[in-house]
Amino acid sequence: MGKPHTQDNKKISAGLTSPDDEAIRYLRNSIISGKHWYLSLLEAVGKWSSPEETHQGRRYTYLVDNSALDWQLVAERLCETVDELLPEKEKSDFLLKGKPPLDITKEQFQTLLGSSKYRQYLNYFYGIIVEEALLLAVKEEVRKERLLAGLIKEEDTTAEAFQRIYGATQQQLLEKFRREKHYRHLKSISLRELKEFTYWIFKYRVKHCDKSRVASDTKKALDWLSRNGYPESLVITYPLTKKR
């Protein structure tokens, strides 16, 4: 992916066409020519270039930590440009529920995105989606254990989940993350920073836990995703095939 840009920057470059303009043009022409919009969309995501941009006052970060592609955010941005060409229910199910309109294989998904984007997608899948699922799975375990122990009072299970997975509190890890990144120590956290933090704690877990523990925790997270309706075609089988 290239350098960040804004819509204003594109206007300044008179007579030049950016790769992102080409991706948008490809998407529109492909749908109009008769190809299914979802297949056209995946190919257009593969052609997208910018790691981040400001569009109509909103900041989009597509590439987390310069290596993890939030392809669904790119897809959302692209869908906006061809909104009138998309079936309303299919578009809504995809954007709001994460439900693809077509059941394609992992191999088809990889081919449509292209090898480079697919590697970045894998980073996002394992580093953010799976890591979030692991936290939710362990929080669920803690909640069930407390119920079995007769502790009926509902309490936040986040602290216990972080201790079990990472051996440290969420606050301790967040402070360490912000020191490394030279970010301000605020009381709140933006969605953009939260994704980057999640990717950071994934790498922290891989670095500090033994391989068998990493494998079992990842399987636990993948099982949680499968039980909770994450599209099967987007669930990648462990073990990882790429060094991080």
Image (cartoon, helix red, strand yellow):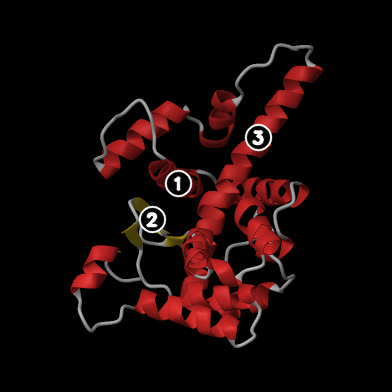
Q: Which amino acid lies under the numbered mark 2 shown in the image of this protein? A: Thr
Proximity of marks 2 and 1: CB atoms separated by less than 8 Å = yes
Classed neighbour count for the residue bearing mark 1: other residues with Cα under 10 Å, few (<14), some (14–19), many (≥20): many
Residue 20 x/y as whole percent: 38, 74
Q: CA distance from mark 3 to mark 1?
A: 19 Å
Dot placed on the residue nearer the N-terminal end, 2 or 3: 2
For label 3, the SS is helix
For label 2, the SS is strand
Q: CA distance from mark 2 to mark 1?
A: 10 Å
> Image quadrant of residue 37?
bottom right
Q: CA distance from mark 2 to mark 3?
A: 28 Å
The residue that appears at 51% across and 31% down in the rendered structure is: 167
> Image quadrant of residue 191?
top left
The residue that appears at 60% across and 88% down in the rendered structure is: 33
Classed neighbour count for the residue bearing mark 2: other residues with Cα under 10 Å, few (<14), some (14–19), many (≥20): many
Q: Which amino acid lies under the numbered mark 1 shown in the image of this protein? A: Lys
52 relative to 28, above or below: above
Give the label on residue 92, or none: none
Q: Which amino acid lies under the numbered mark 3 shown in the image of this protein? A: Val
Residue 67 x/y as whole percent: 40, 62
Q: Nearer the viewer, mark 3 or mark 1?
A: 1
Quadrant of the image for the C terminus? bottom left
Residue at mark 3: 138
Dot placed on the residue nearer the N-terminal end, 3 or 1: 3
Residue at mark 2: 61
Identify the residue at the far front of this view.
84
Residue at mark 1: 195
